[in-house]
Image: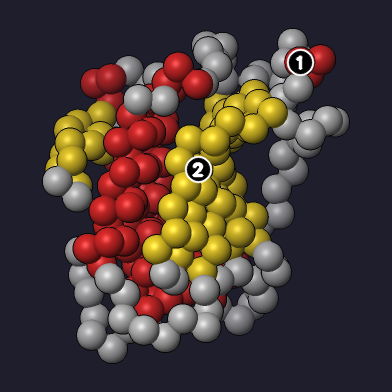
Amino acid sequence: MERRENQTPQGQTAQVLVEFLEVAITAVVFLKGVYPSGAFERRRYMNLVVQRACHPQLRYYIHATVSGLLPFLQKGIVERVAVIFFNSGNVPLEKFVFKLAMNQSYGSAVEEVDLESSLRSFLIKLSISESLTKELPPDCRWEITAYFRSLPETGTNKEADLWIPTDTKQWQQPPLITPIKSMSCEPLCLQLYLEHPCLPESTI
C-alpha cells in the first residue's frame, strides 16, 4: 500500500479505505454468485486470502468507481457506499451498505495497524455472511452507488464530473436492516449492514 508522509490523517485513512472497499465490494459480488467462480482469482490482502476479478471490465468497474471516491472520502462528504442488486424490473432486491464517517477535526497520527486490523475483521465477517443474504434471481444485475452528504461541485474537477444522479427505484417502506459489522478507529467510523425490502415488496 502506498503511503505518503505528508498526507493528512483523513487522506491517509481515505487511501486505506479505497483499497479496502475495492476488495470488499469484490468479495460481495463473489459471495452473491453473480458470476461463475472462475471469474475470480485468489489474492492476498491484509494477510487474508481474498478474491480479485479476472475479467478486465469487471475489475476496472470496481477499481475506477471506488478510486473515484477518494477525494470525496478525504473531505468527509461520502455518507454511504452501497452494492445494490436488482431484479429484471430494476427494483432493488438487496443492498450491502458501507456507512462511514470521517472525523475532519482529527489531527493526530493514524494508527495504521489498528485501522487495518479493524478493516480486516470486516472481510472475515463478510466471507461468512452468506446465510444473512437472500437468493437472487438468475436475471439480476448490480451496481455501486455512493450517497453524498453534499453534492460534489461538477465542473470543478474531473472526479466530480464522473458522478451522475441515480434513478434507482426506492422502496415504499423502510427497509429491513441486518447489521454485519461495525468499527470505530480514529478518524474513521464504519458500519456494514444489509438492507432488504419489507415483506409486501419482496415479491416484486
* Marks 1 and 2 close (CB-CB < 8 Å): no
Q: Name the residue at 44% across, 53% down.
A: 183
Given the image, on which type of amino acid does mark 2 rest? Leu
> In this orientation, which residue lies closer to the viewer: 106 or 59?
106
Quarter placement of the C terminus: top right
| Vertical arrangement, residue 35 with respect to residue 165, above or below | above
Measuring from the top left, give residue 102's x and y in whole percent: 51, 69
Given the image, on which type of amino acid does mark 1 rest? Leu
Q: Is residue 34 left or right of residue 40?
A: right
Disc on res. 199? 1
Disc on res. 192? 2
Q: Is residue 77 left or right of residue 108?
A: right
Q: Name the residue at 40% across, 63% down.
A: 185
In three-dimensional space, the C-alpha distance between marks 1 and 2, rounded to whole angstroms, equals 22 Å
Of labels 1 and 2, earlier in sequence is: 2
Determine whether the residue tagged by mark 1 lies in a helix, strand or loop.
helix
